[in-house]
């Protein structure tokens, strides 16, 4: 499948010095998780049996940090490690200077020899010629900064005693920190509750419809359509699907299910305005042809395709011959045999392609990809697909199936709007450094379960016995990509928080900022 490079899709795995924050509009306190390596929870005290310059045996003893803050939280920063004392800073600076002087002393004899050789060469050349080009004599070997002759670094290695991150666009109420604890499953996982407020507006709960409207902006759809000159390719094998015979335009559908909501495509005027605008025009009692009753404004033809936020709809006459295989109303790529979409219900001449399985671009000479323009990442596209499906099905639980009705995954929408911030702490040379930055972004929180042949047959939610679960049919490539995205999102969670019973926990982003 084609992949868009976006920082929103860079789900980093939970690793050393990881930080994860989850804020919910319905909760006053956010959840904070910090990975603290074992060395930061204890220190080594070294006692020598001899004098300072002697060679007495050293005895090391590990002491737990009890009287200092191993984890420090300020209004914008989260740090771990003991705050360095003045003696420690002076000692580290003294060691760095001494090591730098030693390296300079080792390289000094070489520099003296090179200087003597250069002087001899210059004096010899002066005797034979009155004018000398700088390039005629041997050059002095240039010492590379930070490297020895054997290639090893001469820069003093800074050992960080303190790591931290800075939270952007939000403020932490340090006095609200409560319930600090260490995980029993992972002793290095620190957990607590703390109040975090965005700098602009407070977090508010949003309905599925409100989220769908915020994500799917009709202005962006129309702006993409105005570029014209559409190109449609199979996302897997890059086979061209649209014919170049016509200069094609792009039209916009008001809704993803606009052509399947009623048997005719003019239900907007008939059902919304009640035919009050022109009763004679909307009298279709004597016309039984569905195609003729449909408003041509909403139907694609050989010189125009129609797009919605989920699909591209094209007339079969505008498709390149032999590029598509129609198999039981499914659209199969003739090149790689992957599922691309389906024949439009009630309109046998219209083909509907999923935006993940078939890549749509517009514009000349610069081609702009649809998902990149309208959603800026495939994660946001999949989020709106789930939100719209939950609203259309009237259920927060969905079973995603391929076009041949094979169930692949069960999704349970836990929270339609949460704010996530995650990243890794960076070493701090001093207390003024910011370290890495954490930028909060809104997401949807999901529980999901991936089916195999055995579980798909025994789970009542997968085989249709549970009527409270909605069914969503998508091309196989889209199902596989959604599974991959959710599994990658689970990896950035602390291991102790990745599963609830038989479900995994995952996130999908819905915007790049709060």
Image: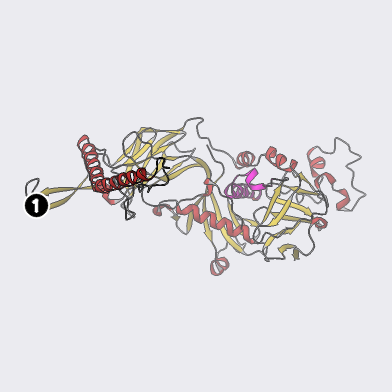
What's the residue at 73%, 52% (across, down)?
231
Furthest residue in direction bottom, as rendered = 454
**Left-right relation of 240 to 146:** right
On the image, numbered disc 1 is attached to which residue? 55
Q: Position of residue 474 (x, y in %)?
A: 65, 58
Foreground: 168 or 343? Answer: 168
Q: Position of residue 476 (x, y in %)?
A: 63, 61
Q: Residue at x 44, y 55 (%)?
A: 499
View extreme (left): residue? 50
Residue 386: in magenta span: yes
Q: How many marks?
A: 1
Whether 401 is drawn above or below 298: the answer is below
In this rendering, does residue 401 appear at all?
no
Question: Magenta residues?
Answer: 365-392
Q: Is residue 47 magenta?
A: no
Secondary structure beneath label 1: loop
Q: What colour scheme does the image use?
A: secondary structure
Question: Which residue lies at the image location 64% right of the left edge and 39% below the top edge?
Answer: 213
Q: Residues within 10 Å of mark 1 (few under 14, many from 20)?
A: few
Q: Main secondary structure of the magenta part?
A: helix
Viewer-proximal residue among 6 and 290: 6
- Position of 166 with respect to 305 (left or right) is left
Q: Is residue 414 left or right of residue 372?
A: left
Q: Quadrant of residue 98?
A: top left
Report if residue 356 is visible in the image. Answer: yes
Q: Position of residue 486 (x, y in %)?
A: 52, 54
- Residue 223 is left or right of residue 68, and the answer is right
161 or 329, nearer to the observer = 161
Where is the N terminus found, in terms of image quarters?
bottom right
């Amino acid at each position: 499948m084609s992949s868009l490079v976006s920082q929103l899709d860079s789900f980093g795995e939970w690793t050393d010095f990881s930080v994860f924050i989850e804020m919910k509009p319905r909760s006053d306190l956010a959840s904070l998780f910090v990975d603290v390596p074992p060395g930061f929870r204890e220190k080594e005290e070294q006692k020598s049996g001899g004098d300072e310059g002697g060679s007495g045996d050293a005895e090391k003893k590990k002491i737990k940090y009890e009287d200092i803050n191993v984890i420090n939280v300020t209004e914008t920063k989260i740090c771990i490690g003991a705050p360095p004392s003045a003696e420690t800073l002076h000692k580290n600076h003294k060691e760095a200077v001494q090591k730098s002087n030693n390296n300079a002393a080792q390289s000094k004899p070489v520099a003296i020899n090179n200087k003597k050789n250069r002087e001899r060469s210059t004096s010899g050349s002066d005797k034979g010629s009155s004018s000398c080009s700088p390039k005629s004599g041997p050059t002095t070997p240039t010492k590379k900064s930070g490297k020895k002759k054997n290639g090893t670094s001469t820069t003093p290695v800074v050992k960080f005693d303190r790591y931290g991150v800075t939270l952007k666009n939000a403020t932490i109420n340090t006095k609200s920190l409560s319930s600090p604890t260490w995980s029993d499953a992972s002793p290095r996982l620190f957990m607590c509750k703390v109040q975090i407020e965005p700098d602009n507006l407070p977090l508010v709960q949003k309905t599925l419809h409100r989220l769908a409207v915020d994500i799917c902006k009709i202005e962006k759809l129309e702006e993409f359509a105005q570029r014209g000159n559409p190109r449609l390719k199979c996302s897997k094998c890059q086979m061209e699907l649209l014919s170049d015979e016509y200069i094609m335009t792009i039209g916009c559908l008001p809704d993803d299910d606009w052509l399947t909501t009623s048997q005719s495509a003019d239900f907007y005027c008939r059902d919304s305005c009640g035919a009050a605008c022109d009763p004679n025009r909307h009298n279709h009692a004597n016309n039984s042809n569905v195609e003729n009753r449909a408003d041509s404004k909403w139907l694609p033809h050989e010189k125009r395709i129609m797009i919605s936020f989920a699909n591209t709809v094209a007339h079969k006459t505008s498709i390149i011959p032999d590029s598509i295989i129609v198999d039981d109303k499914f659209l199969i790529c003739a090149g790689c045999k992957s599922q691309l979409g389906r024949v439009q219900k009630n309109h046998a001449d219209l083909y509907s392609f999923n935006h993940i399985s078939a890549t749509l671009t517009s514009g000349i000479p610069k081609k702009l990809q649809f998902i990149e323009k309208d959603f800026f990442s495939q994660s946001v596209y999949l989020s709106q697909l789930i939100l719209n499906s939950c609203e259309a099905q009237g259920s927060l639980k969905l079973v995603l199936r391929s076009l041949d009705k094979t169930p692949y995954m069960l999704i349970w929408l836990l929270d339609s709007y949460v704010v996530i911030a995650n990243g890794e702490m960076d070493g701090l040379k001093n207390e003024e450094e910011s370290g890495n930055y954490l930028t909060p972004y809104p997401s949807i929180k999901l529980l999901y379960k991936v089916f195999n042949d055995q579980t798909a047959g025994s789970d009542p939610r997968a085989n249709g016995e549970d009527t409270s679960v909605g069914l969503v049919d998508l091309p196989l490539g889209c199902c596989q990509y959604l599974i991959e995205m959710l599994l990658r999102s689970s990896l950035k969670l602390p291991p102790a928080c990745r599963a609830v019973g038989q479900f995994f926990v995952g996130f999908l982003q819905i915007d790049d900022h709060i």
